[in-house]
C-alpha cells in the first residue's frame, strides 16, 4: 500500500510539473497601458518557457530542427495569446496601475482547438498540391500552408507549455514545406519565357508629332540595351517577329502635349524666359508570345522643359518617362 501511495504521488508530481501558470507584469499611468505592458511581458514569458520546454525535452521536437523551433518562437505575438485573465491594482500614492496578465492550464483547450483547426487547414492545402497539375496553384497552396504553419507552431507550443499532452504533430516539417515551395518556384521559372535569354520584338505606336517617333524608339532601345548590359546580356532584340522571339513588347505613346510657359518679368526686366513644357504618357506592355497573354503593363508620365526648343523639351520628357519605367521593366525581364 505504501508503495502504491508513493507511485501515485510520483505520477501526480509528474503531471503537475507539466501544468504551469504564466504571468506577466505591467505598469502604467492608466489601466489600459498597464494591461498592454502586462500582455507584452506575458508574451515574453511564454517565449522563454517554450524555448526551455523544447530544449529540455527533445521528445517534443519530433525531428524539428533548432532553426524551426526558434522560428516558431519568434513568430509568437500577443495576438496568439487566448484566454488571458487580468488582475489590476491601483497604487493611490502615485496614481499608478499595476496589472498582472495570467495564463494557466485551464485555458489549454483554447490552444488545442486552434492548433487542431490550423493542422487540418495545413493538411488540406498540402493535399491539394498533389491533386493539381497547375504549378501556380501548387505554389499558392504551399504558400498558404506555410503561413498557417507559423500560426500552428505558436498555438501548439503554448498548449504544450501549459501542460497539453496532445502534441498535434504534422507528418512533415516547416522546412519540408519550404523546400517543396522552392522546388515548385524553380519549376515555374524554368518553364517561363524568362529562362535564359529573353528575345524581344518591339512595336511602338501612338500620338507622335512629325519626326518624333525615331527618337522615342531609339531611346527605348537604349533602355533595353542598358538593362541587358547590366545583366549579362540576357536580353536581345529582334527586328522581325520570327520563331526566335519569345516576348512581344508593345510601347504606346498615349498622349503628347506641349505648352508654352510665358516669360516672367519684374520691373520690365525678364526674370524667367519663355519655355516649352512637354508632358506625355507612355505605356509598355509585355506579352508571352507562346501563350499570347499579358505579363506586365507599366505606365508613366514624363515631363520635359526647355527654354529654347520644343524638340528638346519633348526629348527630355521621353527620357524622364522611360527612366521611370526602367526599374519595373528590369524586374520583369530579368529573373
Image (cartoon, helix red, strand yellow):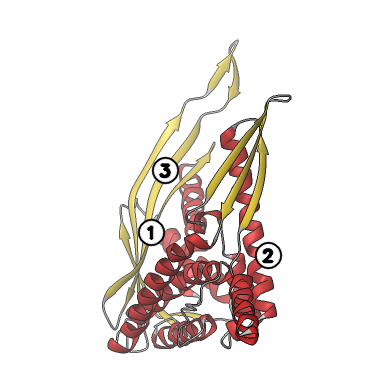
Q: Residue furthest left?
A: 292
Mark 2 highlights which residue? 48
Question: Is residue 195 in view from this perspective?
Answer: no
Q: Position of residue 234 (x, y in %)?
A: 52, 81
Q: Residue furthest top?
A: 267
Rendered-image quadrant of the N terminus: bottom right
The reply to whether dot 1 and dot 3 touch (C-beta < 8 Å) is: no
Mark 3 highlights which residue? 279
**Residue 118 found in image quarter:** bottom left
Give the mark, 2 or 3, whose residue is nearer the N terminus: 2
Residue 320 relative to residue 295: left or right:
right
- Name the residue: 66% across, 43% down: 26
**Residue 95 found in image quarter:** top right
Front disc: 2 or 1: 2
In this rendering, is residue 22 above or below 203? above
Q: Nearer the viewer, residue 55 or 224?
A: 55
Question: Is residue 80 in view from this perspective?
Answer: yes
Q: Secondary structure at mark 1?
A: helix
Neighbour tally class for label 1: few under 14, some 14-19, many 20 plus, Cα within 10 Å: some
Give the mark, 1 or 3, whose residue is nearer the N terminus: 1
Amino acid at each position: 500500500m505504501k508503495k502504491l501511495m508513493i507511485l501515485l504521488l510520483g505520477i501526480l508530481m509528474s503531471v503537475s510539473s507539466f501544468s504551469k501558470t504564466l504571468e506577466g507584469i505591467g505598469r502604467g499611468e492608466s489601466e489600459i497601458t498597464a494591461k498592454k505592458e502586462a500582455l507584452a511581458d506575458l508574451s515574453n514569458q511564454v517565449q522563454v518557457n517554450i524555448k526551455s520546454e523544447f530544449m529540455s525535452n527533445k521528445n517534443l521536437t519530433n525531428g524539428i530542427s533548432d532553426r524551426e523551433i526558434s522560428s516558431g518562437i519568434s513568430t509568437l505575438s500577443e495576438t496568439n495569446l487566448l484566454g488571458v485573465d487580468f488582475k489590476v491594482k491601483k497604487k493611490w500614492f502615485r496614481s499608478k496601475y499595476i496589472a498582472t496578465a495570467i495564463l494557466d492550464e485551464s485555458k489549454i483547450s483554447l490552444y488545442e482547438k486552434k492548433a487542431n483547426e490550423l493542422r487540418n487547414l495545413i493538411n488540406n492545402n498540402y493535399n491539394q498540391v498533389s491533386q493539381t497539375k497547375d504549378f501556380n496553384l501548387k505554389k499558392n497552396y504551399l504558400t498558404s500552408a506555410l503561413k498557417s504553419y507559423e500560426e500552428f507552431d505558436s498555438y501548439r507550443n503554448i498548449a504544450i507549455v501549459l501542460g497539453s499532452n496532445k502534441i498535434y504533430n504534422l507528418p512533415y516539417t516547416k522546412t519540408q514545406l519550404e523546400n517543396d515551395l522552392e522546388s515548385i518556384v524553380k519549376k515555374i521559372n524554368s518553364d517561363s519565357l524568362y529562362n535564359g535569354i529573353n528575345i524581344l520584338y518591339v512595336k511602338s505606336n501612338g500620338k507622335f508629332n512629325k519626326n518624333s517617333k525615331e527618337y522615342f524608339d531609339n531611346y527605348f532601345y537604349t533602355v533595353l540595351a542598358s538593362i541587358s548590359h547590366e545583366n549579362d546580356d540576357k536580353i536581345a532584340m529582334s527586328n522581325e517577329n520570327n520563331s526566335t522571339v519569345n516576348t512581344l513588347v508593345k510601347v504606346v505613346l498615349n498622349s503628347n502635349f506641349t505648352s508654352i510657359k510665358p516669360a516672367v518679368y519684374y520691373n520690365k526686366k525678364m526674370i524667367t524666359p519663355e519655355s516649352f513644357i512637354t508632358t506625355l504618357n507612355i505605356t509598355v506592355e509585355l506579352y508571352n508570345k507562346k501563350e499570347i497573354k499579358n505579363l506586365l503593363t507599366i505606365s508613366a508620365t514624363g515631363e520635359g522643359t526647355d527654354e529654347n526648343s520644343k524638340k528638346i523639351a519633348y526629348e527630355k520628357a521621353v527620357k524622364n518617362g522611360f527612366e521611370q519605367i526602367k526599374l519595373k521593366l528590369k524586374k520583369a525581364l530579368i529573373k
